[in-house]
Image (cartoon, rainbow, N blue to C red):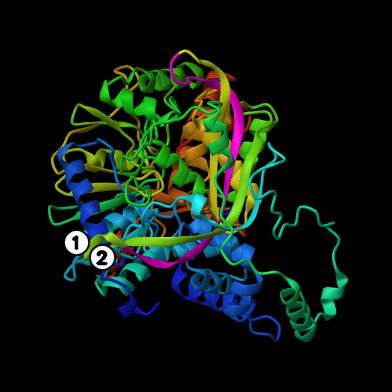
């Protein structure tokens, strides 16, 4: 790719402006899915093109970009996306959460607390939290309009009846600002709490499904649950990162095929490296 | 199960891309793009059609770049298309003005101008011609000279009215009022349901050939749609693409011409004609494609008609099913994303399964299957 053959941030200015309009609309109606004319990118649909279009539309020459894939800065797809954005914008890259201004992420919120200087862009495979109970796009949209969420609650109830607890894993549905049920993208339940009353702006982009939605700073985000079956986090207790010694963070499980042992390490690679370095000093 | 986090991706990606180049450059002969555009026309047309982007040279480069992968070629074309500013919208095309190279009707034997076969594979026997192994350009040149030397040239281009125009005169086809509302543009906006006809036709035009053919076929086999549509007319030929002259909108400029195949399929249906003649009539399904992809064009016409008769219990008649699942980039992208790491999401799922199995062991309950497979709720 010859950089001069393409516009700053790849898309033409008209397309970027249109996407920014959808973003603004999304911010003003927290948790509501806003349709947008998703453009084809040189990255596969379903590989983060929704997040990428948001990043490309809001990025400026002075931004500092961090891209993580399931927490990892070095994951092949994170590298591929980072490389692409750098190539068509020339912006600085970082793995340091604090230093970054825009963080594009697939399925994780960084361990370090995000501030008002941060925009976290999440890549979303399925923006529709009602999809598993209503496959029709038209009907699901109507249900959102009517705040008709009984089917979503019923789904949780059925899981309790069947398995004795809510079996929803990553991508646990949340109620945003007391109005819209939202798919927080498949972040682990552990990360869901970070959405509530945050200092930063969360933007969600679904390229294939052509939807953008947002959780603005200091918005209430509550996981759906029942009084007698409260929302539960994944198990993290008694686990220690084998690299940096961190506890109470979200871990990757590493299985050593030679010794048969199971290890844990921080899923957030940027946090882990920083933590390990701090301990050596 | 080994959950080895993929690290150090950058160097690995670079080597992988070099391996691709190695694979692409196998053998001794370079593939000229001119050979692809002139001798692999149907392939080029399919790439352009699914890309929704008429640019034979770029399609040829795309095919060359990807070892002939249709999926990747369409992908490249689509991505490049996103960077282009739309400067003009062409004037409306009327396929009655088509410079015909082929035109047939399966509904009527005698049609004005008669049946024109043109180049078609329909009546060839599909036997591999091993002579092509030693075919040379001199022989081909000789054939071309002889063939072209013996044909009678027409003084004016072949053009013909539509077969359906004749039926319309007999009131057998409902005459619709012209819908001149500005078409939606699926490349600029997300379409919503219920979808307008312009959205349906644009989506079908760019849909994956295999997908629309399969869904249309399912309709013919009994899943709704029509058991046996009749090809009222299939025409293939060149259409001039014009834009309004910027300084004087009464004038127009011709940009060039494009080869299209257009199909009108007749499907029996209940129609409301003007006034008292309500009853059984003929509905028309419309298909249009770049190039000569006739099966594709017919499939499109079947689905166009099916979508105008909604029925969510049959896939071909269900607009959400048809319009959302044939998009080449979306289907290939989402399926291929399964190759990405899912460590975090899978951890979350495993955690759930383990918790429930542990509790069930304590309680002696047997609610989950041995492998916890029932718990595979869709988290993505």
Depth check, front residue: B70 or B227: B227
Q: Residue at x 47, y 16 (%)?
A: A161
Image position of A28 with respect to B358: above or below: below
* Earlier sequence position, callout 1 versus callout 2: 2
Task: Residue under label 1, please give it.
Answer: A101
Depth check, front residue: B44 or A279: B44
Q: Position of residue B312 (x, y in %)?
A: 51, 24
Q: Position of residue A77 (x, y in %)?
A: 43, 62
Tell if the residue under mark 1 belongs to the same chain as the one under mark 2. Answer: yes
User: What range of the chain is rendered magenta?
Assistant: B252-275
In the rendered picture of this protein, how many numbered marks are placed on residues?
Answer: 2
Task: Give the chain letter at badge 2.
Answer: A
Q: Residue at x 48, y 68 (%)?
A: B55
Q: Residue at x 27, y 68 (%)?
A: A94
Q: Residue furthest top?
A: B276
Which of the labelled discs sits on residue A65, or is there none? 2
Q: Secondary structure at mark 1?
A: loop
Most frequent secondary structure within the magenta stretch? strand
- Relative to B373, is A28 on the left or the right? left
């Amino acid at each position: 790719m010859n950089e001069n053959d393409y516009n700053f941030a790849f898309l033409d200015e008209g397309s970027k402006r249109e996407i920014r309009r959808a973003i603004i609309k999304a911010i003003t109606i927290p948790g509501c899915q806003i349709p947008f004319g998703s453009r084809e990118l040189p990255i596969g649909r379903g590989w983060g093109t929704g997040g990428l279009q948001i990043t490309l539309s809001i990025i400026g020459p002075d931004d500092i970009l961090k891209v993580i894939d399931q927490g990892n800065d070095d994951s092949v797809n994170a590298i591929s996306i980072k490389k692409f954005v750098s190539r068509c914008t020339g912006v600085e890259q970082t793995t340091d959460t604090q230093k970054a201004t825009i963080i594009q992420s697939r399925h994780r919120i960084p361990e370090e607390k995000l501030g008002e200087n941060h925009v976290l862009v999440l890549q979303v495979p399925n923006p529709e939290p009602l999809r598993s109970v209503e496959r029709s796009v038209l009907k699901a949209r109507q249900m959102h309009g009517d705040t008709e969420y009984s089917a979503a609650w019923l789904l949780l109830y059925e899981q309790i009846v069947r398995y004795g607890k809510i079996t929803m894993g990553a991508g646990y549905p949340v109620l945003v600002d007391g109005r819209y049920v939202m798919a927080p993208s498949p972040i682990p339940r552990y990360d869901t709490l970070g959405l509530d009353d945050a200092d930063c702006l969360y933007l969600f982009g679904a390229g294939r499904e052509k939807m953008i939605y947002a959780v603005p700073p200091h918005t209430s985000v509550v996981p759906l649950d029942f009084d007698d079956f409260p929302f539960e986090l994944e198990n993290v207790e008694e686990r220690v990162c084998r690299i940096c010694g961190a506890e109470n963070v979200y871990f990757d499980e590493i299985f050593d095929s030679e010794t048969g042992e199971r290890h844990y390490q921080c899923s957030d690679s940027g946090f882990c490296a920083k933590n390990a370095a701090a301990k050596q000093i | 199960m080994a959950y080895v986090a993929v690290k150090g991706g950058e160097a690995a990606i670079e080597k992988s891309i070099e391996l691709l180049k190695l694979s692409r450059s196998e053998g001794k002969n370079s593939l000229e793009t001119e050979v692809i555009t002139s001798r692999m026309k149907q392939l080029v047309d399919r790439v352009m059609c699914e890309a929704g982007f008429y640019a034979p040279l770029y399609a040829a480069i795309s095919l060359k770049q990807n070892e002939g992968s249709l999926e990747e070629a369409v992908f490249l074309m689509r991505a490049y298309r996103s960077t282009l500013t739309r400067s003009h919208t062409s004037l409306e095309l009327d396929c009655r003005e088509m410079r015909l190279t082929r035109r047939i009707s399966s509904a009527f034997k005698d049609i004005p101008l008669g049946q024109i076969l043109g180049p078609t594979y329909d009546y060839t026997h599909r036997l591999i011609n091993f002579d092509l192994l030693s075919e040379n350009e001199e022989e081909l040149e000789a054939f071309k000279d002889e063939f072209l030397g013996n044909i009678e040239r027409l003084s004016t281009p072949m053009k013909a009215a539509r077969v359906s125009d004749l039926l319309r005169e007999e009131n057998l086809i409902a005459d619709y009022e012209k819908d001149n509302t500005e078409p939606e543009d699926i490349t600029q906006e997300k379409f919503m349901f219920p979808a307008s006809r312009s959205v349906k036709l644009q989506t079908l035009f760019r849909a994956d050939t295999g997908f629309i053919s399969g869904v249309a076929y399912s309709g013919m086999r009994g899943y709704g749609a029509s058991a046996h549509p009749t090809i009222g007319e299939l025409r293939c030929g060149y259409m001039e693409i014009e834009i309004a002259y910027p300084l004087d909108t009464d004038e127009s400029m011709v940009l060039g011409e494009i080869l299209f195949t257009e199909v009108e399929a007749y499907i029996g249906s209940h129609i409301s004609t003007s006034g008292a003649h309500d009853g059984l009539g003929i509905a028309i399904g419309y298909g249009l494609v770049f190039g000569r992809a006739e099966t594709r064009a017919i499939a499109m016409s079947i689905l166009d008609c099916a979508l105008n008769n909604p029925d969510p219990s049959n896939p071909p008649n269900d607009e959400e099913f048809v319009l959302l699942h044939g998009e080449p980039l979306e289907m290939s992208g989402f399926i291929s994303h399964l190759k990405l790491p899912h460590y975090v999401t899978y951890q979350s799922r495993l955690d759930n399964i383990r918790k429930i199995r542990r509790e069930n062991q304590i309680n002696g309950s047997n609610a989950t299957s041995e492998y916890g497979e029932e718990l595979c709720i869709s988290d993505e």
